Amino acid sequence: VSLRIAALGLLAQHPGSGYDLLRRFEMSMANVWPATQSQLYGELNKLASAGQIEVSDIGPRGRKEYRVTDSGRAELLRWITDPSADPPSRHPELLRVFLLNQIPVDAARKYVLAFAEQAEAELARLADLRDSITWDDEPPADFYGRAALEYGLRGAAMEADWARWLLSAIDEGTQAQK
Amino acid sequence: VSLRIAALGLLAQHPGSGYDLLRRFEMSMANVWPATQSQLYGELNKLASAGQIEVSDIGPRGRKEYRVTDSGRAELLRWITDPSADPPSRHPELLRVFLLNQIPVDAARKYVLAFAEQAEAELARLADLRDSITWDDEPPADFYGRAALEYGLRGAAMEADWARWLLSAIDEGTQAQK
DNA sequence: AGAGGCATGTAAGGGGTTACATGATTTC
DNA sequence: GAAATCATGTAACCCCTTACATGCCTCT
């Protein structure tokens, strides 16, 4: 209950083959939901077995174009409107923060600095992405993709701010001990 | 490479049995790294086989108290200072945002509103948590736990703001169509 | 004829979840 | 003596990752 939905969603927007989906993935959802080629093909077969998608056309080299069925559309709707079954989220970065007291202060400081810089780089990357796209606004279409990007921008900014704040807190602490 | 580290980290802070760790988990890292009882015991056995922890004492009902070995401490240090192997993060909530154009605007709006309320509730919960703890400050000890909490607070605030922003953007869009 | 892209798949292994299984000790 | 808590483990199943395997079509 996961990539399955992402594939279903992409197909609902437009039918296509596994290969097509892979490329559409890279350009839209890959930032929020990475997936590998292997896995995608597997999920497509499972979706087909479950009757949520069906082959609409067969092309050149064994190419199978899929399309969503009514059952698939229903499942998609169900998932979108029911966040209760979402898997719990894991934050390796925060787990690391919990463990920072296990290493020397200067190593910890170095990590936090790298974290800040990484967040700032991500912020710049997303800002570029935003500026490089010509948005076709209003509720359907790109609207929600843009909203997701905005989330990313705000998240990166928050992470950078937080890391900078933590850095000064660390510096104050070490200062006090002198 | 994951829960393994969390367990190693907890043991590095203080030796204990699987059962002990389970409870310490709930109180500290469970927010950033959920784990089940089953899994924890499994990881402890793997850590022991790998020589990264060892049984330091055997208690009443088959209770095994573990302690970190030098090899384990080295591994912990390695992990903490090397974020490059972190697993990619997945955001079901954002995947859902990408798919919001598949459902009626009012259903989408309802979801975003629920998201905002959930973020606000989380913010309140974390604020309570912060106020309910007596912090034993300065770099070692609770310092980093507090920093992680601060991250959570800022993240929840950012999510709430973002969702409210998205709500007004949706409303403007639907307004314009009348 | 060969290169590059199109197109799909299998196998092995790690990490995580849920549910079940079992028994010893303490407390009332 | 019964109930709660301490304490550890197994089995089945799903999701994900990496690496490998295979072959067709188009273009130059």
Image (spheres, coloured by chain):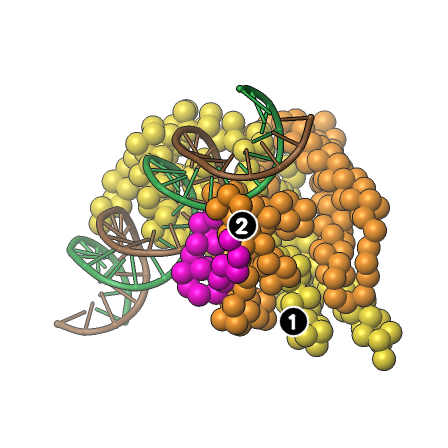
Chain colours: A orange, B yellow, C green, D brown
Q: Nearer the viewer, residue A86 or A1?
A: A1
Number of numbered discs visible in the structure rendering? 2
**Labels 2 and 1 within one chain:** no
- At horizontal 36% and vertical 35% (from top left) the residue drawn is B47
Q: What residue type is disc 1 on?
A: Ile
Identify the element where label 2 is drawn.
Answer: loop
Q: Position of residue B37 (x, y in %)?
A: 36, 52
Picture quarter containing residue C25?
Answer: bottom left
- At horizontal 71% and vertical 32% (from top left) the residue drawn is A113
Q: Position of residue A33 (x, y in %)?
A: 59, 49
Q: Position of residue A125 (x, y in %)?
A: 76, 40
Q: What residue type is disc 2 on?
A: Gly
Residue bearing the label numbered 2: A59
Residue A62 sits above or below residue B53 on the image: below
How dense is the environment of label 1, judged by Cα within 10 Å: few (below 14), some, or many (20 and up)?
some
How dense is the environment of label 2, judged by Cα within 10 Å: few (below 14), some, or many (20 and up)?
few
Q: In this picture, which residue range is highlighted in magenta?
A: A39-58
Residue bearing the label numbered 1: B103
The chain containing the residue under callout 1 comes to B
Identify the element where label 1 is drawn.
Answer: loop
Q: Nearer the viewer, residue D25 or C24?
A: D25
Quadrant of the image containing the C terminus of chain A:
top right
Alpha carbons under labels 2 and 1: distance apart: 31 Å
Q: Decide whether residue A119 is among the magenta residues.
A: no
- At horizontal 52% and vertical 28% (from top left) the residue drawn is B77
- At horizontal 46% and vertical 53% (from top left) the residue drawn is A43
